[in-house]
Structures are given as structure tokens and as C-alpha cells.
Image: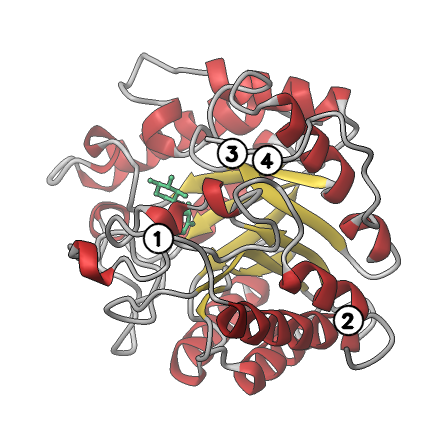
Amino acid sequence: MFHSSVPQTAPVVDPSLCASFARQFLVGTCVGGVLPASLEVAERALLTRHFNVLTPENCMKPGPIHPAPERFDFTASDALVRFASESQMPVVGHCLCWHQQSPTWMFEAGIGRQAALSQLREHIHAVAGRYRGRILGWDVVNEAIADDGDALRDTPAAREIGADFIERAFELARDADPGAELYYNDYNIERPAKRARTLSLLRRLLASGVRVDGVGIQGHWQAGQVPFEDIRAAIDEFAALGLKVMITELDLDVVDRPDCSADIAVQRAYAPAEDVYRDGLPEPIASAQAAQYARLFQLFGERPGAVTRVSFWGLHDGRSWLNTWPGKRTNHPLLFDRAGRPKAAFHAVLASIGGTP
Ligand code: XIL
């Protein structure tokens, strides 16, 4: 996976990304597989040098971790929590309740509110309880707001439990790990209509006394279409509720995709001719991406204290989910290339601190 053209023992000379932003926010990434073996030695060096918070890419999601009512698989999650602790990196738990990568039995059609609630309780207590005291914060509910219309997304949890599955999930998470921060996480919630629905959900939770500590804007944007002004407004409006604001899954896709969502249900086949950056990212595209990353990091740093964490969704381009979603193509959405070398975007982001690059 890691195509290194430089000797793996080459001295690291680039400034550390997370150290450069240490006074502003944490800088993280997701990681997949069973650590430490899922990463090569040079990748682990890249990870611990540039990032100071970890999110499991898949292993803590309801499906992988709790495949059957009486069966849990903690192999990868235990390994990640151990690796993070040895590397002195906090862990963001992702995620306790989501309609994707979730086992059908948990909110099986027709089981009714009480059975569904009790399964949600068992799930959250088992998972958040196992890592009690070792998780910085949990994405308690992921992607509950509909993309269109004025309602919540139509999901098995919402159908079986009712709209208050969100309140209940947050209460259960608070009880299971009172020391962990509790987040609502979603994509496109910077966009005006979905942002308004998110604000009303968050206000509803806060008004009813449910503890919510932060909101995660996923940040799966397309290069050339980054909604900077919406992002700025969303950060301000979420922060005005007294919530921490986090950019939780940042990447800037350079290949066209069918819509601007990050809905994993959306699929599209790419013909070989559409795999336009198979041989690498042309310099003009890399520079344009770099300028957009720099502008984003300037914006994240603009309101001291509002943005508390910026996490990328992948360590380097070769590890990005955008190589396979919404279909197979070669993508280049992150700050490091497939060999772990810093791209123009990395240098532009660092240059953005304290001024225009
Ligand atoms: C993605 C993972 O990166 C993939 O490996 C997996 O196949 C599908 O899910 N929003 C989220 C993340 O909250 O959990 C998703 O992660 C990307 C979209």
C-alpha cells in the first residue's frame, strides 16, 4: 500500500503539522485495520509526527464491533486504543449510532420502541463502557439529519424508537462514559438548509437538558467547490450555542463525483478513462487544492477557541476512502501523497499560519 520511493530511514525534516497548530486545535486522522500491523513503519512515523488525535476508520462502528446481539469484536478497537495510549494520542470514538455499517438486528423492523431502546442501551453501555476513561469524545450520533426536507433522516432507529433516539443515545453515552465528550457528527451541515435543521436539533437537545459537547462537520468537500462562507457561518453559529466545533473527516476530492454528499449509499462506477489522475496529480490541480486547504486552515484558526479539532479522513492519499467511494478511482485528497511525502497542500497549510501563503 505504501509506495515509498525514499529510504524509510530518511531523516524527517518537515515541520510537524500538529505541532504547528498546537495553539489552535488538535490535528488528527482516521486509521484503519488492526494497529500497529495495519500501518508500515514509515506510516507510523508519519502518523505520530504529524497527528495528535486518532479516529478509528471503521472498527468502532456498530456493525463491525457488535455484529450479533451476543457477539462483539473488540480486536481492532482494543488494538487502536492501546496503540493510541502508547503513542500518547487521544482517541475519538466513531460512532455509537449510525444507519450505515450498523447491524440490522439492532433496530429490526417491527421490534418496537422498547426492544430497540434496550438494544441501543446494551450497545452503548458495552462499547462506550469498555473504553470508559480512555476516549476523548464520542461521535454519539452520526448523520441523523435528512439531506432534503425538514426532517430527520428516515432510518431504522428513528422508525423503531422515534425521533428521540438521539436524546436517548446521548444520555446513554453520558452514563456509559461520563468523562468523554459527546458529539453530533454529520456531512453538509455547513450548508444553509441542513445547517438550520442541525441548529434546531442541537437547540432541542440543549433545551431539554441533554448533554452535548460538540458538533462535527465532516468536511468531505470537493476541490473547487468548497463552501467557504457556509463553513465560516456554520462554525460561528454552532459555536454560539456553546458547543465545540470540529472538522472531523476532512478531505478535498479531486475527481468528480455524482453529488456533494458523503452518503456511503451513493455508488457510481468509474470507467478506466474517468480515472483521470491514475498517474499522479497534475501540478495545477495540486496547487489549486493547496490554495483551498490553506484558506480552510486560515478560516479554522480565525475564531480562537471555536474550532477545537481538525481531523483528516486518512493518513495519506493511498489510504483515503475516496479511492473506493463512490467508486474505484485514483484519488489525491489529503496532505501527503502515496509515498507519505508532503504535497503542495501540506506546505500551503503550514504557510497559512499567520498570513496568506
Ligand atoms: C467510511 C470509511 O472510510 C470506509 O472505509 C467505509 O467503507 C465506509 O465508511 N462518513 C463517516 C465515515 O462518518 O464513517 C465514513 O467512513 C465516511 C463518511
* 238 over 121 or under it: above or below: below
Q: CA distance from mark 4 to mark 3?
A: 6 Å
* 350 over 288 or under it: above or below: above
Instruction: Tell me which amino acid carries mark 2.
Output: Gly
Q: Residue 195 appears at what percent x and percent y? A: 46, 77
Q: For marks 4 and 3, give the one nearer the viewer.
A: 4
Quarter of the image with the C terminus is bottom right
Nearest to N terminus: mark 1 or mark 2:
1
Instruction: Tell me which amino acid carries mark 1.
Output: Arg
Nearest to N terminus: mark 1 or mark 3:
3
Residue tagged by mark 1?
A: 278
Q: For marks 3 and 2, give the one nearer the viewer.
A: 3
Residue tagged by mark 3?
A: 3
Labelled pair 4, 3 in contact (Cβ < 8 Å): yes
Q: CA distance from mark 3 to mark 2?
A: 33 Å
Ligand 1 under 8 Å from disc 3 Cβ: no
Q: CA distance from mark 1 to mark 4?
A: 17 Å
Nearest to N terminus: mark 4 or mark 2:
4
Quarter of the image with the N terminus is top left
Q: Residue at x 77, y 31 (%)?
A: 10
Q: For marks 1 and 2, give the one nearer the viewer.
A: 1
Dot 4 crowding, Cα within 10 Å, few <14, some 14–19, many 20+: few
Q: Residue 135 appears at what percent x and percent y? A: 66, 33
The answer to whether residue 39 is visible is yes
Q: Residue 343 appears at what percent x and percent y? A: 63, 57
Nearest to N terminus: mark 3 or mark 2:
3
Q: CA distance from mark 1 to mark 3?
A: 14 Å
Secondary structure category for the residue under label 3: loop
Q: Nearer the viewer, residue 50 or 176?
A: 50
Residue tagged by mark 2?
A: 301
Residue tagged by mark 4?
A: 5
